Image (tube, helix red, strand yellow):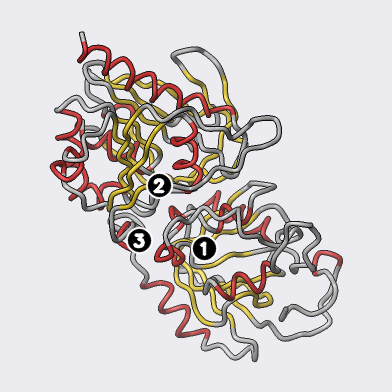
C-alpha cells in the first residue's frame, strides 16, 4: 500500500504528498494516493454504482480503454480470489486501464481472499488511485459526460502536470474506436469448464442439446457458464470469424458477446458477418456490444451516451411480459430505437432514462439485450433470457424437422 495510514474520508492525510493524479482532458487535476501498478494509464473515465462485485467489474473485458470510478466508497475489503474473474483469455487482462477509489484499500477480510486488491491490481498492470472525492467526480461526469483522462501513479510523487494535461486533452474519443482486438480470443476453443454445483443443485447443467457458436468480442466467463448450464455445447470463435467459419461448425444458434469500444467501429467488419447469419435464419442471441451490432446489422443506429449505464441495480422492463427486472449494466453506447426498421420490435426498455434495452426481429429467430443477463456481478432476474435463447433454438429445430 502506498496510501498513508488513516482514512481520507475521516479527515486529513498523514502524508502531504500525492502519489497519484487523475488528470482530466479539461485540465482538472484530482490528487490522491497511488494503488496497484506504477505508471500512466490513459482512458475514458466512467462511474460504476455497484456495491458488490468489484473483481468481476475489473475483469470485464468490455471496460478496455476505460478508467472506472467506483461510487461505493469501500472497495477491496474482501480481497480477490481465483474464481470471480470474468476475463476468459489471458490476453484480455489488458481490459480496464485504471480505477478510482474513495477510501484506501484495507487488508482483505474474507475466507476466499487469495490476495489483496492492491497486489492484484499491480499484477494485472492496472493503475489505481484512492483518496479521491468520488462523489464530486461522479457529479462532474453526470454534468459533462465521461471525460478522457490520464491516471498517473508515481510512488515518489513526481509528476509533469503540464505534459499530462496536454496528453489528456489529445486522447481520442471512445467514439470511433474498435477495441475488440485487445480482448478477443486469438483462436477458436471449446468451452469446457467443469461447473461448480451447489449442494442445493444450483449450477447443475442441463444435458447438452444445442450447439452454440459464441463470437468473442470480449466475452464474460459467466455468459459461457450460463449458456452451458442452459444445455448448450459452446465453441468460442475470434471476433474476426467469417460467416463460413461459423456455419461450418453447424451451430443450432449463434451468440454475439459483449465487448469494449464503439459498436459502429467494430461493426465495420462484424456487421456483414452478423447480417449474413441473420439472413440465413440462424437463431441468434446478442448481449450488449452484440446487441448493438445486431441492431446495426438490420439497419439501425447506435449513439454515444452522455454518462452511460454502469451498475448492478438498473430497472428494465420486458415489454413482452410487462415485468420489471433489476439488471446489471455496462455500456456507453446505445441503440437508437427510432432508427430500427419495421421488422424489429423494442422488447426491453431502461426505466432510468427510457433508452433501448432489447430488440427482437419479427421475421427471423433473433433477439438481443443491452443489459447483462449473466449478472456477474448483479441480480439474477434476467437469467430467463438464456432459456429464451434455448427455446428459440428448439422452435427452429422443430420447424426444420417438420
Ligand atoms: N458491455 C458491453 O458490451 C459494452 C458495449 C459498448 N462497448 C458500450 O460501451 O456501449
Q: Secondary structure at mark 1?
A: strand
Q: Nearer the viewer, mark 2 or mark 3?
A: 2
Q: Position of residue 181 (x, y in %)?
A: 30, 61
Callout 2 crowding tier (Cα within 10 Å): few <14, some 14–19, many ≥20: some
Spot occupied by residue 68 in the image (x, y as percentages of width and height): 55, 59
> Mark 2 highlights which residue?
191
* Mark positioned earlier in the residue sequence (2 or 1): 1
Q: Residue at x 35, y 48 (%)?
A: 190
Residue 94 pos. (x, y %): 44, 67
Q: Residue at x 51, y 43 (%)?
A: 222
Q: CA distance from mark 2 to mark 3?
A: 34 Å
Q: CA distance from mark 2 to mark 1?
A: 30 Å
| Residue that badge 3 annotates | 173
Query: Up-down: is 299 above or below 329?
Result: above
- Dot 1 corresponds to which residue? 67
Crowd tier of the residue under label 3, counting other residues whose Cα lies within 10 Å: few below 14, some 14–19, many 20 or above: few
Distance, label 1 to label 3, CA atoms, is 14 Å
Task: Name the quadrant containing residue 100.
Answer: bottom right
Tell which of 178 and 27 is nearer to you.
Answer: 178
Amino acid at each position: 500500500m502506498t496510501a498513508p495510514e488513516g482514512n481520507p474520508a475521516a479527515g486529513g492525510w498523514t502524508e502531504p504528498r500525492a502519489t497519484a493524479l487523475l488528470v482530466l482532458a479539461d485540465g482538472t487535476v484530482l490528487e490522491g494516493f497511488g494503488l496497484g501498478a506504477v505508471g500512466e494509464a490513459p482512458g475514458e473515465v466512467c462511474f460504476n454504482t455497484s456495491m458488490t462485485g468489484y473483481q468481476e467489474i475489473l475483469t470485464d473485458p468490455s471496460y478496455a480503454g476505460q478508467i472506472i470510478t467506483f461510487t461505493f466508497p469501500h472497495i477491496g475489503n474482501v480481497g480477490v480470489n481465483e474464481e470471480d474473474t470474468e476475463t476468459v483469455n489471458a490476453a484480455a487482462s489488458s481490459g480496464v486501464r485504471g480505477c478510482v477509489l474513495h477510501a484506501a484499500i484495507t487488508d482483505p477480510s474474507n475466507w476466499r481472499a487469495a490476495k489483496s486488491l492492491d497486489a492484484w491490481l499491480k499484477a494485472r498492470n492496472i493503475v489505481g488511485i484512492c483518496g479521491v472525492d468520488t462523489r464530486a467526480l461522479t457529479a462532474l461526469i453526470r454534468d459533462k459526460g465521461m471525460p478522457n483522462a490520464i491516471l498517473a501513479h508515481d510512488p515518489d510523487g513526481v509528476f509533469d502536470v503540464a505534459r499530462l494535461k496536454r496528453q489528456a486533452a489529445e486522447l481520442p474519443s471512445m467514439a470511433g474506436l474498435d477495441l475488440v482486438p485487445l480482448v478477443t480470443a486469438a483462436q477458436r476453443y471449446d468451452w469446457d469448464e467443469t461447473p461448480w454445483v451447489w449442494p442445493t443443485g444450483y449450477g447443475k447443467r442441463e444435458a447438452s442439446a444445442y450447439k452454440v457458436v459464441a463470437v468473442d468480442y470480449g466475452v464474460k466467463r459467466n455468459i459461457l457458464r450460463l449458456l452451458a448450464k442452459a444445455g448448450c455445447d459452446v465453441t468460442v470463435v475470434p471476433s474476426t470469424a467469417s460467416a463460413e467459419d461459423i456455419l461450418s461448425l453447424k451451430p443450432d444458434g449463434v451468440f454475439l458477446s459483449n465487448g469494449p469500444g464503439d459498436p459502429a467501429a467494430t461493426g465495420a467488419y462484424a456487421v456483414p458477418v452478423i447480417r449474413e447469419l441473420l439472413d440465413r435464419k440462424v437463431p441468434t442471441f446478442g448481449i450488449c456490444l452484440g446487441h448493438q451490432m445486431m441492431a446495426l446489422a438490420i439497419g439501425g443506429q447506435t449513439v454515444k451516451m452522455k454518462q452511460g449505464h454502469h451498475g448492478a441495480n438498473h430497472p428494465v422492463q420486458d415489454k413482452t411480459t410487462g415485468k420489471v427486472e433489476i439488471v446489471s449494466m455496462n455500456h456507453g453506447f446505445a441503440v437508437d430505437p427510432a432508427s430500427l426498421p419495421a421488422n424489429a420490435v423494442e422488447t426491453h426498455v431502461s426505466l432510468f432514462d427510457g433508452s433501448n434495452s432489447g430488440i427482437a426481429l419479427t421475421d427471423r429467430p433473433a433477439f438481443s439485450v443491452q443489459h447483462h443477463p449473466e449478472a456477474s456481478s448483479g441480480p439474477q432476474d434476467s437469467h430467463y433470457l438464456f432459456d429464451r435463447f434455448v427455446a428459440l433454438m428448439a422452435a427452429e429445430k422443430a420447424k426444420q424437422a417438420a
